Image (spheres, grey):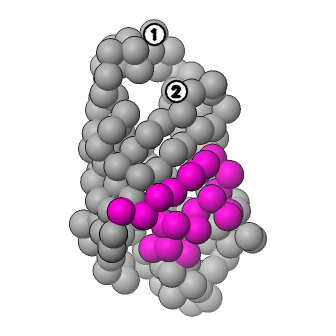
Amino acid sequence: MSRHFRFSGQWLVDAPHDALHARLVDLEHYPDWWPEIRAVASLGDDDALVVVRSRLPYDLELHLHAEHRRADLLETTLDGDLVGWVRWRLEPRGDRTHLVFEQEVEVAGRLLGAAAYVVRPLLVWNHNRMMRSAVRRMVTA
C-alpha cells in the first residue's frame, strides 16, 4: 500500500464552457456550491488556504497555488495535508462541457499517512463521493 493517490474522472456537464470555467476559477465561492469545501481563505491572486471535509471525520487543510487558468486547463498545486496537483480540463460541446478531472497527491503527515495505508479503500470511496457531489452541484447551485 502507498501514501500516493491518483484520481480521475470525466463528465459531460450541462453547462456552457464559459460559465463552468468561471465557476471553477472562482475558488473563494466553492463553499457556496460544494459542501465538502468547508472554507476558503484567499492569500492573493494565485494562492488560497482551503479546508475540506467529506464523510470521514477529519479535515484536510490545503494550500493551493494556481499554475494555469486557461480556458481549456485549470491546474493547481497542493501543499499541506496533501502534496501534489489537481487539474480540470474543459472542452466545449455545444451548450455543454466535457470536463476531465485529474489529481495526483501524496498524503503528508504521520497520522494521515498511516491512515492512508490502513483505510485506503475508504479514502478512495470518500474522494469519489466528494467528486460526484461536486459535479452534481456545480451547475445547480
- Compared to residue 96, the image places residue 32 above or below, namely above
Which circle's residue, 2 or 1, is located before the other in the chain? 1
> Looking at the image, which is closer to me, 133 or 95?
133
Q: Can residue 27 be found in the magenta stretch?
A: yes
**Of the residues shown, which amino acid type is indicated by label 2?**
Leu
Q: Residue furthest right?
A: 140
Graded by Cα atoms within 10 Å as few (under 14), some (14 to 19) or many (20 or more), the crowding at tag 1 reads few
Residue occupying the point 50% across, 73% down? 26
State the residue in front, 15 or 52: 52
Q: Amino acid at mark 1?
A: Val
- 32 displayed left or right of 47: right
The part of the chain drawn in magenta is 23-43
Judge by depth and name the residue closer to the eye, 82 or 98: 82
Q: State the mark number for residue 123.
A: 2
Q: Is residue 87 above or below residue 19?
A: above
Instruction: Kindly identify which residue carries mark 1.
Output: 118
On residue 24, the disc is: none
Mark 1: secondary structure: helix
Residue 1 position within the rendered picture, expressed as x and y whole percent measured from the top left: 33, 14
